[in-house]
Image (tube, rainbow, N blue to C red):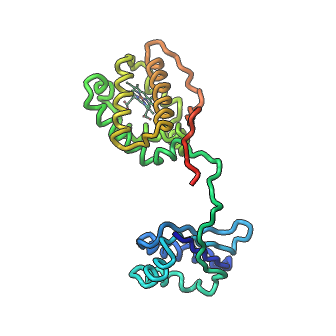
Amino acid sequence: MIVEYIRYRIAEADAAAFEEAYGRAARALTAAPQCVDYELTRCVDEPGRYVLRITWTSAADHLEGFRKGEHFPAFFAEIRPYVESIEEMRHYGPTAVRGRGGSVPTLYEWAGGSAAFERLTETFYGKVLKDDLIGPLFAGMDPGHPRYVAMWLSEVFGGPERYSAERGGYAHMVRQHLGKAITEPQRRRWVNLLMDAADEVGLPDDPEFRAAFAGYVEWGTRLARGNSQSGATPPLEAPMPHWGWGVAPPYIPNS
Ligand code: HEM
């Protein structure tokens, strides 16, 4: 692989048109089999400077494959007006100096974001509705329920705070369980079906993710069961829970 850096200096008045042109040109990069990935960044300290980074499968694939290939004409048509503004355009190869920083992805990111939780809850509630033990509890379920629970899980695992903003947050969720008199066998069935769904939709199955995921599910379902008993008065103004990796963050090899 080889990285091409193209440095531009663009007048403030042309910046918006430049970004739009690259937005269109990028479709050709997305389609090109020689392109691994690309990113256009704008200098924060000097907004007139831009750097486009394109990773190619090789320099030859870029120069021979892409430049002489079917996608180049559409790409070049968009960026032609900015060729004069290029300050540097070169290929760079890797050196031995490379590594990862210490940042740890959230469980939400690791799982695959909102789309992954939506796939999970769609499959899960499909199973729930057919289940003899807990299906009846959900007989009058709001059709949006799988999506709302995906929003809830996304937020708990470090994703966007959409359940709080759009669905009434913690208090609304707790109220939904009041009086449902969930039994232990029902709680356990809920857990089992969720884990089956996690396997079915391909949530990450590394030990660290599944341990953290199962930890939250145990905690949450036990609270839901407790809150659902007759006479329970759970606090409604408690904060939204946020779940992390706990003692076992993911192992990310440094390569
Ligand atoms: C980690 C555990 C759990 C989570 C995260 C969770 C999440 C939620 C959320 C977010 C809602 C409200 C959705 C909305 O905004 O309308 C809800 C409602 C509900 N939950 Fe749970 N829940 C859990 C455990 C359980 C268990 C163990 C049961 C029963 C076995 C259960 C039964 C219900 C029912 C029946 C509703 C009302 C559904 C409807 O009629 O629309 N929940 N849950």
- The C terminus is located in which quarter? bottom right
Quadrant of residue 97 within the rendered picture = bottom right
Nearest to the observer: residue 161 or residue 111: 111
Residue at 39% from the left image edge and 20% from the top image edge: 180
**What percent of the width, then of the height, locates residue 176?**
44, 27
Quadrant of residue 118 within the rendered picture = top left
Residue at 64% from the left image edge and 73% from the top image edge: 50
Residue furthest out toward the front: 96
Residue at 29% from the left image edge and 27% from the top image edge: 135
Q: Is residue 200 left or right of residue 84?
A: left
Quadrant of residue 87 within the rendered picture = bottom right
Q: Is residue 175 visible?
A: no
Q: Is residue 30 visible?
A: yes
Residue furthest out toward the right: 45
Residue at 58% from the left image edge and 51% from the top image edge: 254
**What percent of the width, then of the height, locates residue 227?**
47, 19
Q: Is residue 133 left or right of residue 217?
A: left
**What percent of the width, then of the height, locates residue 58?**
49, 74
**What percent of the width, then of the height, locates residue 177?**
43, 24
Q: Is residue 47 left or right of residue 130?
A: right
Nearest to the observer: residue 237 or residue 92: 92
From the viewer's perspective, is residue 200 above or below residue 25?
above
